[in-house]
Image (spheres, rainbow, N blue to C red):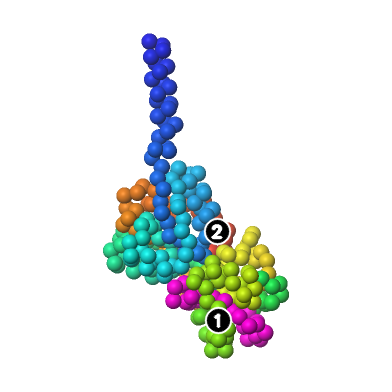
Amino acid sequence: MLHHRFFLTAIAASLLSVAPATWAETVLVAVASNFTKPMTEIAETFQQSTGHSAKLSFGSSGKFIAQIENGAPFEVFMAADDKGPIKLEQEGLAVAGTGFTYSLGKLVLWSATPGLVDDQGQVLNKGGFKHIALADPKLAPYGAAAIEVLKKQGVFDKLQPLFVQGENIAQTHQFISTGNAELGFLALSQVIDNGKIASGSGWIIPTDRYQPIRQDAILMKTGAENPAAPALLKFLKSPEALAIIKKYGYDLAE
């Protein structure tokens, strides 16, 4: 009898030990390039907290929308704006009522060269550079915000011939960091460390110079039956995730 009880106890303990791994799922997530650093960290914390894992793909919001419309199996879409998720919901590709703003983006004019960009952005008026990089405004909301800033500064027409356009904000960062463009517009999260610009020089552009960059996430219908997908969206609202989002320079939606 004693051996029988021990055997049952051992079986129960074994089932409990494998249950989390059995229940854990992987969610396929399309993430706007500007959110690469925070989302990589959030995904790690998400897995530690829930057992679920997130397989992340980074790129431009515009390209992701086209891919999803053509059958890409992403289960969660984390865009760089609010228009894309709304469009997918209207097209019946996303689950109605699941969209929300997970962060408010901030734009920075940055150069890998120390001292080139002043903290008021006067370099845009003074010139002295041959190339200025920005993400394609037709695909990337940060690129559209950069155009807004240049127009408000009254320098758009003068600087447009100097544009070097990245497919997304990650490629734009590469252009600037390698010197192919002396300066350009990025997401603050790409160059921030401990609340400050980590290297080079930059101007954190006041948010009243461009329309709010409301970055929305939404559950795709392809992820409706995957428990990891709504779990990730829920986790994005958790104190742990919000702390990471703020650490990378984003504001939170009220």
Above or below: residue 204 compared with residue 7: below
Element assignment for label 2 = helix
Percent across and percent down for residue 75 are 37, 56
Q: Is residue 109 visible?
A: no
Query: Could you say which is closer to the camera, residue 77 or residue 173?
Result: 173
Instruction: List the residue tagged with mark 1.
Output: 163
Q: Quadrant of residue 21?
A: top left
Q: Residue furthest left?
A: 92
Q: How crowded is the residue under tag 1: few (<14 C-alpha within 10 Å), some, or many (20+)?
A: some
- The amino acid marked with disc number 2 is Lys
Q: Residue at x 33, y 65 (%)?
A: 70
Is residue 125 inside the magenta stretch? Answer: yes
Q: Which residues are magenta?
A: 121-145
Percent across and percent down for residue 215 are 45, 65
Q: In the image, 104: left or right of 66? A: right
- The amino acid marked with disc number 1 is Phe
